[in-house]
Image (spheres, rainbow, N blue to C red):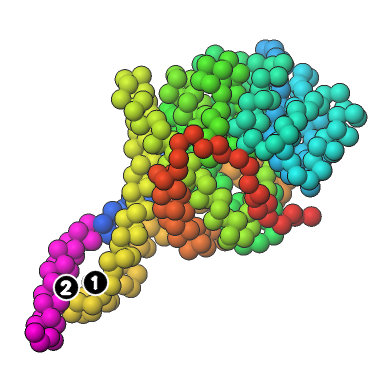
Amino acid sequence: MTFNLQYWTDSFQSHWHTLVVWWTPIDANIEGFIYYYPLFMAYVWMFGALIFYFRFEWHNTGNAEHLPELKEYPPVSILIPCYNEAANIRETIDILLNQKYPNYEIIAINDGSKDNTLHILQELANKHEKLRIVNLHTNQGKAMGLRAGALIANSEILVCIDGDALLAPEACAWMVKHFLDNPKVGAVTGNPRIRNRSTLLGRIQVGEFSAIVGMIKRAQRSYGQIFTVSGVIAGFRKSALHQVGYWSNDMVTEDIDISWKLQLAGWSIYFEPNALCWVLMPETLEGLWKQRSRWAQGGTEVLLRYFNKLFRWSSRGMWLLYSECFISIIWAFLILMHLLFAPFELLTESTLKSLHDLSPSWTSMLLSLTCLIQFGVSLFIDSHYEEKTGGVAKYYYWMVWYPIVYWLMNVGTTIFGSIKAVLKKRGQRAIWVTVDRGLRQK
């Protein structure tokens, strides 16, 4: 039997041509979706955020440092789950002791820290009677730490922050207001602000938390449901937590999980932009990748776990939110498919003749312009919350790097995190991991 090179060459070219002919129209539709989906969602978020701003914020502009008028001051328990927070916990508690709220306690949960976090907490507890300590001898995970703190708390209202967070003195009062005004409010998410801004990634995240995180929370609240409270700053009604079984120990992002638990049970989640909390964020690509992969994995875990509960009529309020999150994951995988099949088209004669299409077109220009408009609107809304730091408008310049740095990374982390969520064994305990806290700004 002889090898016929010409036969195999013709056969390969024929099959290659068939594949290209089959894929090209599909890829054209995918490319259109890749362009127009973020364009459409950008205007959805902007419109919703402006609705929220004119309904709830504009008359309170500049009032973040003023206390709201409350008809009563119920006791509040501030929970701080800690794992290896020796470098930050002293400052966190010192700031908490300045809360402009007359009736609160602080509960710090040491979750098997390997540094001297426990020693520092014991030292502070001896000085401040407001501080109580819960010590877990082994690392049980943030969800278990929060649950332990909630069970011994003396208050119906719980405010949960991270061990490196600096809570604004007025934050508790602003969050308590919602629990008093509406008995159906199960949680209130605060407004995290970036502390460390010494690198390009840090400066970009200042704009991101305004243009993406803050804007989306405002819009989601306008449309009815919020995907997640901020894990670094959120208030909860203890009876609501008890009804849904508190935080889940096997979910990698306990904040996303508890948000869905509460809303599927009929509780509302509100966003309070005046509840400021200053946080540390990753300033290395490796740290950012790990953080965003965990967020993506947690989001996919929630979509998988609560899919069946969406078929109940009482869960109809979550349908649009679920659809948007699911489509966002599909969007990331379609970008991957588009990139993988790009060589098939580039090797065709028709594609080689139309390489001029790779030059800036009206779609890419429109997307870039929309991106800048979105950043401008969000920074305008958020500017008065950072007047002491000189405002956030100065970070507008750095946001031109957002599509380059973050869009590509978000596609990668969404794919990676979603695959991990699908492959993860259900019931596996989610424990603490060491995170990148960036470079401290002096």
Q: Pointer 1: what residue?
A: 344
Q: Circle 1 sits in a helix, a strand or a loop, which is it?
A: helix
- Mark 2: which amino acid? Trp
Dividing the image into 4 quarters, which one contains the C terminus? bottom right
The answer to whether residue 56 is left or right of residue 235 is left
Tag 1–tag 2 contact (CB < 8 Å) = yes
- Is 64 or 30 nearer to us in this picture? 30
90 or 181, nearer to the observer: 90
Q: Which mark is residue 119?
A: none
Q: Is residue 96 left or right of residue 341?
A: right
- x, y percent for residue 147: 63, 26
Q: Which residues are magenta?
A: 1-29
- Does the magenta portion include 25? yes
Tell me which residue sits at (50%, 30%) in the image: 259
Q: Residue at x 91, y 29 (%)?
A: 127
Give the answer, above or below, for where 241 lies relative to 166: above
Q: Tell me: residue 255, above or below residue 266.
A: below
Element carrying mark 2:
helix
- Quadrant assignment, res 310: top left
**Amino acid at dot 1:** Phe
The outermost residue toward the front is 1
